Amino acid sequence: GAVVSQHPSRVICKSGTSVKIECRSLDFQATTMFWYRQFPKQSLMLMATSNEGSKATYEQGVEKDKFLINHASLTLSTLTVTSAHPEDSSFYICSARDLGQGALETQYFGPGTRLLVL
Amino acid sequence: SQQGEEDPQALSIQEGENATMNCSYKTSINNLQWYRQNSGRGLVHLILIRSNEREKHSGRLRVTLDTSKKSSSLLITASRAADTASYFCATTPGANSKLTFGKGITLSVRP
């Protein structure tokens, strides 16, 4: 089946530093990837839609200058949390649609990245 | 904003019992999907039901959809301790639209 990986799985950083999270589709191509954020015991909130070769589309209330998204290839999207602060600590999950599948509705999720900003 | 609302928010059952979880949504949809999330992990896609379908089965899972009531249910039969997880419904208004998740249900299956 379709596999999506994320790296790193867990990261601890100091306040003010930037952190990059990678999302890769391992066995399929994805023109569209999604970035979600999840606080403890809460649901997933979509942050942005990442489109290969074009600018990401951010959801209302998400700062595009703080959460930089780059989708340089059909198998890789990156999310960079710039000048991270403790309130950015969260679980970040990416997902991808399989370009080759007829069922474009199905998204495949990565295992998530736990970010802790001290 | 969140589209789906699951109930109950938490469910605790004995192994072997059936678990029924419900999801209601607000706007018209193209399809509704159920996902499972184990603690601290990513989401696993369980089943997708389209707006023109009423019921779908996959192994021990049975999903129903009532578009007139804007609701769906997920039934897990003969539950196992390994089914312990959070379950989310998610909807899309169009075929290529983004997913909107409900708040989730925490299922605990006691061995």
Image: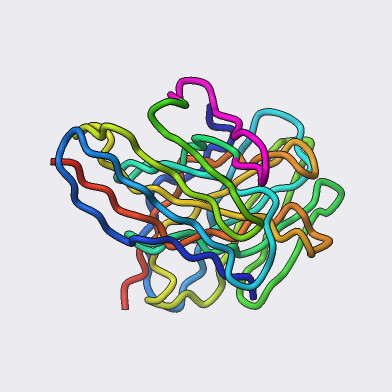
User: In the visual, does B11 lie left or right of A77?
Assistant: left
**On screen, A88 above or below A23?**
above
Q: Tell which residue pokes out farthest to the right in this image.
A: B52
What is the quadrant of the C terminus of chain A in the image? Answer: top left
Colouring of the image: rainbow
**Is residue B61 a member of the stretch shown in magenta?**
no
Nearer to us in this view, B77 or A84: A84
Please tell me which residue is depicted at 71% across the width and 60% down the height of the picture. A98
The residue depicted at 39 percent of the width and 64 percent of the height is: B38
User: Which of the 4 image quarters holds residue B67?
Assistant: top right
Q: Position of residue A38 (x, y in %)?
A: 38, 43
> Any magenta on residue A58?
yes
Question: Residue A78, how many percent across, how many down?
Answer: 48, 49
Relative placement, left or right, of A47 versus A108 is left
- Left or right? Give the position of A62 relative to B67: left
For image coordinates 58% across by 47% down, the residue present is A71
Disc tally is 0
Q: Nearer the viewer, residue B109 or A23?
A: A23
Q: Which residue corresponds to the image point at 65% horizontal and 78% vertical from the top-left? A: B59
Q: Quadrant of residue A90?
A: top left
Span shown in magenta: A50-63
Q: Is residue A43 visible?
A: no
By secondary structure, the bulk of the magenta-drawn segment is best described as loop
Location of residue B101 in the rendering, given as x and y in whole percent from the top left corner: 55, 42
Residue B87, given in percent of the width and then of the height, sits at: 48, 55
